Image (tube, rainbow, N blue to C red):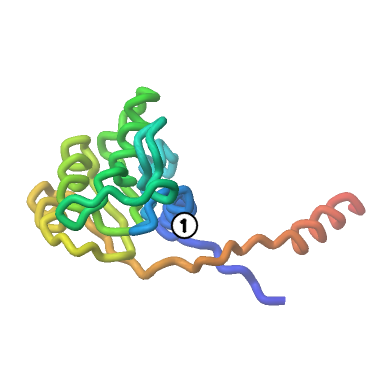
Amino acid sequence: MAEIKRPSWDEYFLKLAMLASERATCPRMHCGCVLVKDRFVLATGYNGSLPGQPHCEDEGCLIVDNHCVRTNHAEINALVQATKHGVNIVGSTAYITNMSCTTCAKALIAAGIKRVVVFSDFHDTLATQFYSQAGVEVVKMDMPSKEIQYDLMNYSSAKKTEKSN
């Protein structure tokens, strides 16, 4: 039987960001963000419309200067979620599926993020420049596997063995 490779912490949290991106409501880009400190998830976000407002997938995108402005980006929604719940994110890591736009990079820097882990590039290079100037470490990784390595069969076998002992 093949042994399942346990993901690194960075892979694990990037996979959570990938999962968060599945909630996105703008068809132009699905993006997820997970804010983590000391291996503890503080907040999550995905690109989506303001609460109570129409979603792009329902009413179409609202394009200004080739950008959809109907939605907040994943990073902003994660920051808002942390704020709403009184969570201090200073010194945390942002795991993001796509490199931040300039505006989101500035917001994360201002909020005190110290590290960004990402696997996909973004067309706006000012984010990388701003992160560098602010001393925010940027780690670019390969995209983690899209598969969830859930091994119910071996778990069930282990439980049976425990009960028989």
Q: Secondary structure at mark 1?
A: helix
The answer to which quarter of the image holds residue 154 is bottom right
Q: How many marks?
A: 1
User: Identity of the amino acid at label 1?
Assistant: Lys
The answer to which quarter of the image holds residue 49 is top left
Whether residue 157 sits left or right of residue 33 in the image: it is right
Q: Is residue 93 visible?
A: no
Whether residue 128 sits left or right of residue 43 in the image: it is left
Q: How far across and down, in percent of the image, does residue 111 sit?
A: 21, 35
Q: Classify the position of the N terminus by image quarter.
A: bottom right
Image position of 142 with respect to 79: above or below: below
Q: How far across and down, in percent of the image, does residue 59 sit?
A: 39, 46
> In the orientation shown, which residue stands out farthest toward the bottom?
1
Image position of 88 with respect to 144: above or below: above
Whether residue 104 sits left or right of residue 96 in the image: it is left
Q: How far across and down, in percent of the image, does residue 60 sit?
A: 36, 51
Q: What residue do we see at 26% from left, 39% from top? A: 91
Q: What residue do we see at 20% from left, 53% from top? A: 101
Provide the residue designation for mark 1: 15
Q: How far across and down, in percent of the image, does residue 136 sit?
A: 18, 50
Q: Residues within 10 Å of mark 1 (few under 14, many from 20)?
A: many
Foreground pick, 38 / 78 = 78
Q: What residue do we see at 11% from left, 56% from top? A: 126
The answer to which quarter of the image holds residue 10 is bottom left
Q: What residue do we see at 15% from left, 51% from top? A: 102
